[in-house]
Image: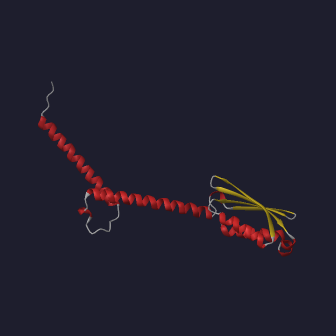
């Protein structure tokens, strides 16, 4: 039978536990050093360990929320500045008195659709139909308009297309 010296195993366990406590203390200190100083009056060393862990947890959660907001803001800016695949994109075709405008945007660019409708009305073009479809984060708008006599007298199709080009360029 193998009988070990009880005092030897007890000393080993004490050493192991002491090493574990020292390692945990070093980890807590490292975590605490990553967190900016809090606005409380007590020095860090005087704050209890559970309070330090709670402060670190709150700080990490706050940083995660900030990161999520920044990601949302970035996505809005990317889509409003042309985004992936050179969005927004505008194309138009004129055939006689018929005008077709195809607008491809991100989900956050609905203002472009209403602005194009407004531009067409300013040019006295009659909007006959307007449709849209959504695929993933991309919106495809199609506007069919009729260029009337008054519009032809003002600028005609060339004037309308120039205004639409300028508008699309300014949005990107």
In this rendering, position of residue 148 left or right of residue 91: right
- The image position of residue 159, as x and y in percent, is 80, 71
Q: Which residue is drawn at 78% across and 68% down?
A: 161
Q: Quadrant of the N terminus?
A: top left
Answer with the quarter of the image where residue 88 lies: bottom right
In this rendering, position of residue 100 left or right of residue 52: right
- The image position of residue 154, as x and y in percent, is 83, 75
Q: Which residue is drawn at 23% across and 49% down?
A: 21
In this rendering, position of residue 131 left or right of residue 52: right
On screen, residue 59 above or below 12? below
Q: Which residue is drawn at 67% across and 57% down?
A: 139
Q: Residue at x 16, y 37 (%)?
A: 9
Q: In which quarter of the image is the C terminus?
A: bottom right
On screen, residue 8 above or below 78? above
Q: Which residue lies furthest to the bottom in this view?
A: 154
Q: Which of 15 and 155 is in front in this view?
A: 155
- The image position of residue 80, as x and y in percent, is 62, 64
- The image position of residue 76, as x and y in percent, is 58, 62
Answer with the quarter of the image where residue 127 lies: bottom right
């Amino acid at each position: 039978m193998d009988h070990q010296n009880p005092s030897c195993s007890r000393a080993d366990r004490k050493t192991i536990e002491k090493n574990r406590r020292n390692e945990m203390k070093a980890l807590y200190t490292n975590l605490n050093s990553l967190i900016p100083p809090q606005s409380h009056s007590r020095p860090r060393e005087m704050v209890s360990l559970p309070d330090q862990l709670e402060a670190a947890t709150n700080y990490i959660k706050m940083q995660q929320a900030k990161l999520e907001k920044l990601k949302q803001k970035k996505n809005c800016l990317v889509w409003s500045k042309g985004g992936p695949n050179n969005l927004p994109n505008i194309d138009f075709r004129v055939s006689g008195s018929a005008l077709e405008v195809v607008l491809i945007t991100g989900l956050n660019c609905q203002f472009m659709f209403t602005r194009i409708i407004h531009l067409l009305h300013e040019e006295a073009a009659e909007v006959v139909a307007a449709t849209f479809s959504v695929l993933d984060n991309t919106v495809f708008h199609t506007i069919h308009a009729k260029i009337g006599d008054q519009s032809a007298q003002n600028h005609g199709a060339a004037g309308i297309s120039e205004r639409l080009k300028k508008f699309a360029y300014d949005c990107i």
